[in-house]
């Protein structure tokens, strides 16, 4: 080795050691100080910012704090409200509501948490600069709603957006050769069609009607109007702040400091006193135990957030979250074997994914149910594979606007011969076995190959999915098939059909689990989050294969997150096509429905 290379190697090693020392030092400091709770002054007002995607749960560990931007989660927000409700040092809450990318199910869960806080008698005010339907919907749960004087309310009604890629695929010379079970299992339609089928449109309209009517009725009730008056205001939107105030949709037009002054008066502060504000990032360090919460019998809360696949879950530090069957099965098995855990709450926020991974999780739930109660709590989504892993729980709890059901499956492959011809690429297959080329990407399925695939899919639907839902929900298979067929229901509709037991959020699901586990109502409950988050050093010094896979995944996530939203959605569908090409049977929601 040359002298120059030796010097470079030594300098590189020194730099690496330096980086490790710095990182380890930060980790040590973090572990030393993270449990030192900040001092909260009496008569304080908690300020909570509500914005962004609001994933169900984000682990509170070092890597997330360093690299995840201290992401907001729905669980964290609701926990702050639960603590503030009983914390005598907190006299009120100010909600700063920004644009929200979460779904309607989470919006309803937030409204429930705000309503629960109000039972304390403490004031909770909402402040909006500019808001759409969802932001205003959440704000109406607060005691008073304010919009900045130059702000606007874009409560224009609901619009559903569904993308179709058939035109693009035709231009690229790609043909989607797909087979699906269920009249409403429209997921392949986004590849095979350029517009909605009648069945697709029927479901979208039914979902829109259900959510829109609930939106109108909720606004009417909270703002003391008739539903017809609210519909007329929606038809006249967007509304400037002054018009919204005149119409009685808000309590005033004020800037943020003026809202704080309003709270000062309400809480009895002197004019020359400053309002004592406590930020969410500070209050997050206050443990629930310190205010008398999260004590008592242990109930495991296991999060299944994102698309379902094999392998390990992704907690979303560097992008979107995903459910890995290996991770989730281990967490459920750990909770089953732990005698100190009295019940399991599986929190599902998933559109589904591959059938094989979903089935592995279903089996783990079935085994766990033999030893202790299992309750499912659904967030925005509990559809297709997300419903499959839920159907055998003792109870299923969902919000009224949760997308659920979608009992159906599909499979297929993209045929890209036209694309290869356009590029001038040729290929040949040399095979042994009649169906060895079943998933070759340059040829459509032969008659025999398609018959084989259809047989597998029909078996999955009629011999696995339908019977398991029927047994889990106490219904006969014919009835489940009639409400299945791939159809997506809202939580309210699903409750009428028997697919959901009760309406509510995670807190309600924990209370249901407590009752099923025969834990007395006057005895506390301690929530145990599983799987336990991997520590910083586990991630840093894990196996080389894990480290390489993690780095590769982080690079992919970072690149994808930098792209425009519609491009990201297109890439997600491309990934699904890639899985289908490998022969994976998909149990996933039949459309990516955005309702704004």
Image: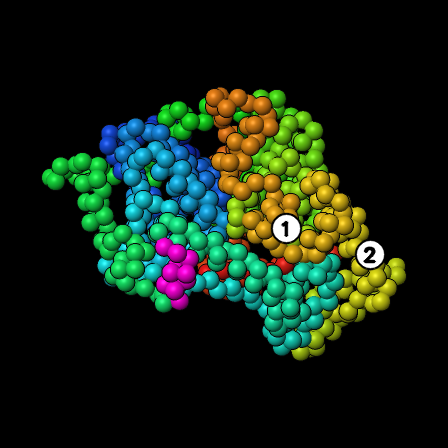
State the CA–CA distance, disc 2 to disc 1.
23 Å
Q: Which mark is residue 520?
A: none
Query: Residue at coordinates 67% horizontally, 69% vertically from top-left?
Result: 192
Query: Residue at coordinates 36% horizontally, 63% vertically from top-left?
Result: 233
* Label 1 crowd (10 A; few <14 / some 14-19 / many >=20): many
Q: Which mark is residue 455?
A: 2
Task: Say if residue 550 shows up in the picture.
Answer: no
82 to the left or right of 324: left
Query: Disc 1 marks which residue?
Result: 405
The residue positioned farthest toward the left in the image shown: 272
x and y percent of residue 379 in the render? 53, 46
* Labels 2 and 1 touching (C-beta < 8 A): no
Tell me the element at label 1. strand
Query: Residue at coordinates 32% horizontally, 64% vertically from top-left?
Result: 239
x and y percent of residue 432 in the render? 87, 60
The colour scheme is rainbow
Question: Toward which corner of the image does residue 472 lie, by quadrant?
Answer: top right
Residue 26 magenta-drawn?
no
- Closer-to-camera residue (343/218): 218
255 to the left or right of 309: left
Q: Is residue 298 above or below residue 273?
A: above
Looking at the rendered image, the disc whose residue lies closer to the viewer, 2 or 1, is: 1
Tell me the element at label 2. helix
Question: Toward which corner of the image does residue 30 lie, by quadrant?
Answer: top left
447 to the left or right of 342: right
Magenta range is: 225-235
């Amino acid at each position: 080795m040359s002298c120059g290379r030796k010097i470079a190697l030594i300098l590189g090693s020194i730099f690496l050691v330096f980086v490790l020392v710095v990182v380890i030092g930060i980790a040590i400091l973090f572990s030393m100080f993270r449990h030192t709770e900040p001092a909260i002054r009496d008569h304080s007002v908690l300020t909570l910012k509500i914005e962004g995607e609001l994933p169900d749960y984000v682990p509170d560990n070092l890597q997330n704090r360093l690299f995840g931007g201290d992401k907001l989660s729905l669980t964290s927000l609701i926990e702050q409200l639960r603590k503030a409700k009983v914390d005598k040092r907190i006299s009120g809450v100010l909600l700063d509501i920004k644009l929200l990318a979460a779904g309607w199910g989470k919006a309803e869960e937030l409204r429930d948490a705000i309503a629960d806080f109000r039972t304390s008698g403490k004031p909770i005010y909402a402040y909006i600069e500019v808001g759409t339907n969802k932001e205003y919907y959440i704000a109406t749960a607060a005691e008073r709603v304010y919009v900045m004087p130059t702000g606007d309310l874009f409560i224009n009604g609901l619009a559903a957006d569904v993308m179709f890629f058939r035109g693009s695929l035709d231009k690229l010379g790609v043909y989607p050769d797909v087979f699906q079970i269920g009249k409403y299992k429209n997921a392949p339609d986004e590849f095979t069609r350029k517009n909605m089928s009648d069945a697709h449109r029927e479901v979208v309209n039914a979902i829109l009607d259900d959510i829109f009517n609930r939106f109108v009725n909720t606004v009417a009730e909270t703002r003391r109007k008739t539903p017809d008056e609210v519909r007329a205001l929606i038809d006249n939107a967007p509304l400037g702040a002054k018009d919204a105030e005149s119409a009685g949709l808000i309590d005033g037009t004020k800037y943020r400091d003026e809202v704080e002054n309003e709270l000062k008066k309400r809480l009895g502060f002197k004019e020359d006193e400053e309002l004592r504000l406590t930020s969410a990032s500070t209050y997050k360090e206050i443990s629930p135990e310190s205010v008398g919460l999260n004590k008592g019998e242990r109930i495991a809360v296991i999060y299944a957030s994102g698309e379902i696949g094999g392998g390990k879950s992704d907690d979303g530090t560097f992008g979107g979250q995903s459910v890995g069957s290996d991770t989730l099965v281990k967490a459920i098995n750990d909770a089953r074997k732990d005698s100190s855990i009295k019940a399991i709450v599986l929190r599902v926020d998933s559109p589904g994914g591959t059938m094989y991974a979903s089935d592995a999780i279903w089996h783990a739930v079935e085994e766990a149910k033999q030893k202790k109660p299992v309750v499912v709590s659904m967030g925005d989504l509990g559809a297709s594979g997300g419903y499959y892993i839920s159907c055998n729980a003792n109870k299923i709890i969902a919000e009224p606007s949760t997308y659920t059901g979608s009992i159906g499956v599909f499979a297929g492959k993209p045929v890209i011969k036209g694309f290869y011809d356009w590029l001038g690429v040729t290929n040949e297959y040399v095979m042994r076995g009649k169906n060895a080329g079943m998933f070759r990407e340059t040829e459509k399925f032969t008659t025999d190959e398609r018959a084989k695939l259809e047989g597998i899919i029909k078996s999955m639907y009629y011999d696995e999915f339908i019977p398991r839902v029927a047994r889990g929900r106490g219904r006969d298979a014919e009835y489940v098939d009639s409400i299945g067929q791939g159809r997506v229901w809202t939580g309210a509709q699903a409750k009428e059909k028997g697919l959901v037991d009760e309406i509510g959020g995670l807190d309600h699901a924990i209370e249901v689990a407590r009752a099923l586990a025969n834990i007395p109502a006057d005895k506390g409950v301690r929530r145990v989050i599983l799987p336990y988050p991997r520590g910083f050093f586990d991630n840093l010094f894990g196996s080389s294969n894990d480290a390489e896979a993690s780095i590769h995944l982080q690079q992919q996530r970072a690149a994808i997150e930098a792209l425009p939203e519609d491009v990201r959605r297109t890439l997600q569908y491309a990934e699904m096509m890639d899985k289908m090409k490998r022969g994976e049977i998909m149990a996933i929601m039949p459309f990516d429905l955005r309702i704004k």
